[in-house]
Structure formats: structure tokens, C-alpha cells
Amino acid sequence: MDEKTLIAKRVALELQDGFLVNLGIGLPTMVAAYLPNNMNVFFQSENGIIGMAALPEQGFALGDLTDAGGAFIGALPGACAFDSATSFGLIRGGHLDVTVLGGLQVDQSGQLANWMVPGKMVPGMGGAMDLVSGAKRVIVAMQHTAKGKSKIVQKCTLPLTSVRRVDLIVTDLAVLQPSDEGLILKETAPGVSIDQVKAATDCELIIPANVPEMQITE
């Protein structure tokens, strides 16, 4: 399977029945496709919907039914729409069980930078700051490296999204858990060695005596 699918499948294992979950733009949106069939998770988008779903098929797009990135979405039976004030009240009030966000950098203290792309015009950090600060659990889903450089660094050089430490980092090489002592290597991707993870990481990792492989089904 490709790297993004592997990441999305592994993140999906962190969700539980009945969770209220926000999926960030890009790779995180793939997570919804890999939930077990008998699991009910309520997906929220910060532009004002709970119960969003993928489009059932081409031709069903509605111009006023999109996610926060402007992509067309579907809606499950019983879905509800509301204004941005209500949406951010849910986020800032701590009612989201999980948010899954992409990342440009995560450092060894677990801080995330994911909104400022060097050399590109960006409209701002959007809801990412609120999501990282307000959700009960923050999972970063991203590739371990970009253009030959590690995205797991000693200290973020890009502007931080929030001062809060994220809870879990899932990459195409490993699962990392930030702690007071640093980043703990919790799992390696199928076929990836600990030495490969270390070589692709620009900071020290805490490596337990036993590091299992991700349990991902094809």
C-alpha cells in the first residue's frame, strides 16, 4: 500500500465508537475511509457540520456543502449544520474527542507547526490553532520526511500552531508519542527497522526495549 494509505489506516485504529472527530485538510481526510464497518464516528468540520461523509458518487456535489478546505462532501442521515460560532464553541469548549491534522514539522517536545508554508502566500492558520488547543486528543498524520529532510526535528523552525503538545504522531515510518522526556518510539511501520526511523529523524528518540510493528491490514 502507499504511504498515505498506511498512515490513514493506522490513525483509524485510534478512533472509537461514538467519537466526535475533526479531520484536517489533505491526508487526514483519508482516515474516514478506513473505519471498521460497525463503528459509528461523527465527523465534524469547523465550517459548521457534524455528520459529514464522502460523496456517494460523482454528480452529487452541492455548491454549499463543503468541508473547511472547500472540497465537496456528503452528509449522513441526521447530520446537522450550524454557524461558525457554534462550530468553534464545540472546538474551544473541549467537546471534540480527537482532531487529526497534517504537519510540516513536529519537534522533540511534541509541538506542531502546520500552517506556514515557506515562500508561499497563506491566508492564515485557520482553525488549526483552535483544534490543537481545544481537542481532547491531537493526532498528527504526516509523512516522516519531505524533499529529503526530516519533519521530526529537534526544534520547530516554522511558526508554531499552538504551544500545546500533541498526543500522537503517525508517519509512514513510525508511531511516536511525545512525553516530558522526549519522543517515544511506539511502533515501526511494516518492514521498517528502528535504525531506518532513527536515520530519518532529526532529533533523539526514546527507544523502549520492545518496539512492535504497526498492525495494519492490507
Image (tube, rainbow, N blue to C red):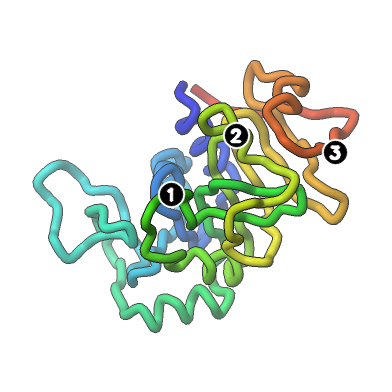
Left or right of 22? Residue 136 is right
> Label 2 neighbourhood size at 10 Å, few (<14), some (14-19), many (20+)?
many
Between the C-alphas of marks 2 and 1, the distance is 21 Å
What's the residue type where badge 3 is placed?
Ile
Place residue 198 in its image quadrant. top right
Q: Quick one: label 3 or label 2, which is nearer the N terminus? A: 2
Q: Is residue 210 above or below residue 163?
A: above
Q: Nearer the viewer, mark 2 or mark 1?
A: 1
Q: Is residue 185 above or below residue 101?
A: above
What's the residue type where badge 2 is placed?
His
Where residue 109 sits: x, y (%)?
76, 53
> Label 1 neighbourhood size at 10 Å, few (<14), some (14-19), many (20+)?
few
Q: SS at mark 3? A: strand
Q: Residue at x 53, y 25 (%)?
A: 217
Q: SS at mark 1? A: loop
Q: Hey, which residue is sitting farthest front in the picture?
A: 119
Left or right of 213? Residue 44 is left
Place residue 31 in its image quadrant. top left
Q: Residue at x 31, y 59 (%)?
A: 67
Q: Hey, which residue is sitting farthest left in the picture?
A: 59
Q: Which residue is mark 3?
A: 206
The numbered dot on residue 144 is: 2
